[in-house]
Image (cartoon, rainbow, N blue to C red):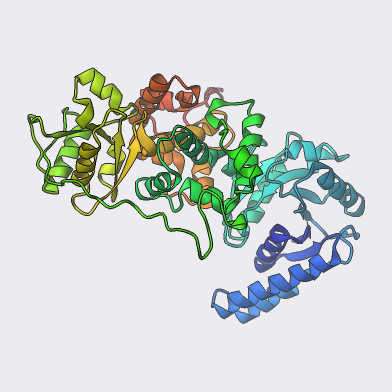
Amino acid sequence: MRIRIVGAGAMGRGIAQWAASAGHTVELGDVRAEAVEEAVAFVRSMLERAVAKGRMSEEGGAAAVARLFPLDDPWAPGPDVELVIEAVREDLDTKAEVFGKLAQALPATTVFATNTSSLSVTRIAATLDDPTRLAGLHFFNPVPLMKIVEVVPGTATRPEIPAALTELVEGCGHRAVTVADTPGFLVNHAGRGLVTEALALLEESVARPADIDRIARDVLGLRMGPFELMDLTGLDVTAAVIDSIWQGFRNEPRLRPSYLTPNRVTAGLLGRKTGQGWYAYGPEAPVDAEEPVTGDADRPVHVPGDDEDSRSLREALTAAGARVETSPSPAAVVLVPVWGTGVADAVAARGLPAARTFGVDPLSVASGRRVLSVTPAADPAAARDARAVLARGDHCVTLVRDSAGSVGQRLLASVVSVATSIAERSLAAPADIDLAVTLGLGYPTGPLAWGDRIGAARLLELQGALHTTTGDPRYRPTRWLTERARLGLPLTDPGTTPEDCAG
């Protein structure tokens, strides 16, 4: 296939490398001639590096370079061009101008694809005389390494185009997911679950950014915590995406932005690129070390209740050599597994001693980091001792402020909730949601499969408790989760639709 790429920036050059390496003839154009020269040199250097590292044969690298053709004029006639991929800046007028000029220069049969990440594909297509020829083809940076592409049909896109684009993408070694033309498409939309809830936790002073990140990594298994991720991406970019998706979905509470971000963006605290974000960067940056464990690890402990979470916690503490009392003595600290509720609720409901009662997140018990919730009524010395007991067996222990569901549960519930909302609206198929999130965001598993690992019924209990305890509509369970919990279906199961039963 002969493909023309318009826009020779980071995305355009990445797409050019990807397509040429897969055997396609690639024309690369830009309104800035020097940008094309720089892009061709960059692609050549990347292909040479791939050859040097043994990822590509010398002949294959040379052939890929030979398939790359720089254009002096991006609007030059191209009677053999079958596909155009636009990768210019995120501005509707600019993209409309690009496709308007291309429509005059290329055959009517040429398919147009926009690499937009935030604009409506339908709105871009509407600027053309023939809006049926355009679809979204959203790559992620760096294109050769990020093996996922979102195929986004506009409202008027001809039905055969998404299938053809999917075939192209997968023929070039990437995975393609078909996504509805909605704000954020799939990956950026699904990614809001983690960062918006992390910001909500910080708003409520539940934990510091470093502690939230530690819990995200060590308890949930994420490669990077939400605040580390925002610093890497840039808070200006993250805040703009959060706002645009929230506004695009008509102020959906599940996607609600934080009041914390605007002032930080205005102050230039954007992350790595400015040297200061949620963390400081550079040779003089302080290291945010964990506090040493100083309490009495031999203090007796009592775990009330006979539910599975309580039994698991007792067994773990006993195995680590802790003094676990069946009947609590006046000196014992009380550890209560909490699921969707707070320690304060357990103290009030069970008549537990407020100064000596603490919460433990069940998600953290089997991990390398345990999470201990502290109420305003806690005795600091008892809290230090409870931390020391939980640290037995070489565990790290993070102290957080008591809140409904604790940190890990709230992050997980939000990630799954946003994903089930996407599935519920039929914005993408369940399998595509999980595939796109694992490849696009680097999560250890897809959010729907993650929910199945916890169990739909248990997640419904968690989200229902969060919603009831806080009264916040952001935590209301989705229909997708509720139905599957009631019916015994996995969250990954698309289920039966009325269309399946017709005829």
- In the image, 273: left or right of 369? right
Q: Can you give x and y, in whole percent of width and height, for residue 15 in the image?
A: 69, 60
Quadrant for residue 204, please give it: top left
Q: Can you give x and y, in whole percent of width and height, for residue 34 in the image?
A: 83, 68
User: In the displayed structure, would residue 302 be above or below residue 40?
Assistant: above
Quadrant for residue 190, please give it: top right
Looking at the rendered image, the quarter that the N terminus falls into is: bottom right
Q: Nearer the viewer, residue 437 or 226?
A: 226
User: In the displayed structure, would residue 498 be above or below residue 274?
Assistant: above
Question: Residue 286, can we see it?
Answer: yes
- In the image, 367: left or right of 111? left
User: In the displayed structure, would residue 158 be above or below residue 166?
Assistant: above
Disc tally is 0
Q: Can you give x and y, in whole percent of width and height, for residue 372 in the image?
A: 28, 39
Q: Can you give x and y, in whole percent of width and height, for residue 23 in the image?
A: 68, 67
- In the image, 258: left or right of 455? right
Residue plotted at (54% across, 47% down): 436
